[in-house]
Amino acid sequence: MSTILDKIVATKRQEIAAAKAALPERDLREMAACAPTPRDFFSPLAVPGPIKLIAEVKKASPSKGLIREDFDPVKIGKIYEAHGASCLSVLTDAPYFQGHLDDLRDVRAAVGIPLLRKDFILDVYQLYQARALGADAVLLIAECLDDCNLRKLYNEAVALGMTPLVELYEPGNLQRVFDAGATLIGVNNRNLHTFEVDLEHTLRLCDRVPDLCVLVAESGIRSRDDVQRLQAAGVDAMLVGESLLAQSDIGAAVDRLLGVSGT
C-alpha cells in the first residue's frame, strides 16, 4: 500500500521532469551562478544561548489542509524576522502544500535573514532551482533518498554554497545522515508515511546526535512548554510554522513561543 510520502515523491518526479522540459538544466545553472551570494544558514543556529527559531512560511499541508487564508509570504517573512526568528523556511511544493517557487524568491528579496527551500528534493536540478531563486539552504530528507543520492545532493548543495539541513524520522537513518557528512540535522516529529506527530520523537533521539552537530526539532511544536522541554534536552533549534500561522497575530505567537516578556 502506498503511503502519503510515496504519493508525494511520485508527484515530485513528474514535476521535476516537466520543469526540465520547460527550462534546461544548463540554463538553470547559469541563473544559479548569477544569484546573490548565499547567506550563512548554519552559524545563526549554532550560536550558544536559547533555542533558535526557523520560522516557516507555509500555506497548507496534507494533514491540515489550508492553514491560513490571508496568506502573504512576504508579509509573514517580515513579521517572523521582526520578532526574532534566526532563519526562515519557505515551502515551495505546490500540489500538497500550496507553495510556489516565487514565494522563495519574493521572501528572499524582502528579508535579511537566511532562507531554506523546504521541498522534497530528489534531483540536482532542484538544487539549481533553489540557488537561482536565492535559497541559502535546502532540506534533504533521508527517507526520500538512498545513500548515493543523499551524499550526491549533500555535496552538490555545499558546492553551490548552500547549507543542507538533513532530516530524518526513522532512527535507523541517523548513521546514514552522519555518513553523508551532515552537521545540521533535523529530526522530524511527524512520520511522513502516516503524518502522525509525536514531540517525544526528538527527545528520544537527541542524545544520539553529537555535540558538534546542530540539532533541529521539526513539527508538533505548539507551546512555550514544548520549547522549554526541547531546550532543556539540548536541542539547538526548532522549525515551526503551522502553530504560528494558525494564529491571528503571528508576531504575538512568535513572541509567546520564544518567551519574550510582555506578551
Image (cartoon, rainbow, N blue to C red):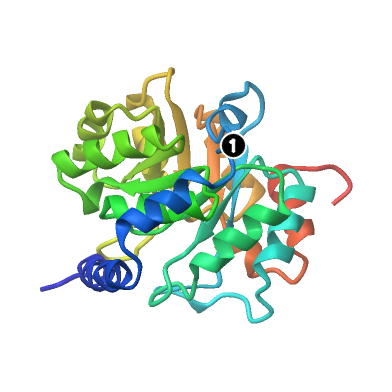
In the displayed structure image, the side of residue 90 where residue 224 appears, left or right? right
Q: Residue at x 66, y 47 (%)?
A: 224
Viewer-nearest residue: 85 or 130:
130
Q: Which residue is mark 1?
A: 39
24 left or right of 52? left
In this view of the protein, which residue sits in the foreground, 33 or 49?
A: 33
Q: Is residue 206 above or below residue 75?
A: above
Q: Secondary structure at mark 1?
A: loop
Which of the image's four quarters has the N terminus? bottom left
Neighbourhood count class around disc 1 (C-alpha, 10 Å): few under 14, some 14–19, many 20 upward: some
Position of residue 167 measured from the top left corner of the image (x, y, whole percent): 35, 44
> Amino acid type of disc 1?
Arg
| Furthest residue in direction left, as rendered | 1
Residue drawn at (69%, 64%) of the image: 74
Residue 93, image x, y percentages: 42, 68
Where residue 104 sits in the image (x, y, percent)?
A: 56, 60
Q: Position of residue 30 (x, y in %)?
A: 42, 50
With 142 as the anchor, is 231 left or right in this view? right
Say if residue 155 shows up in the picture.
yes
Question: Considering depth in this image, is 229 or 92 the residue closer to the camera?
Answer: 92
Question: Residue, x 66% and y 24% (percent of image)?
Answer: 49
Q: Residue at x 30, y 33 (%)?
A: 155
Quarter where residue 195 is shown: bottom left
Residue placed most toward the observer, 10 or 61: 10
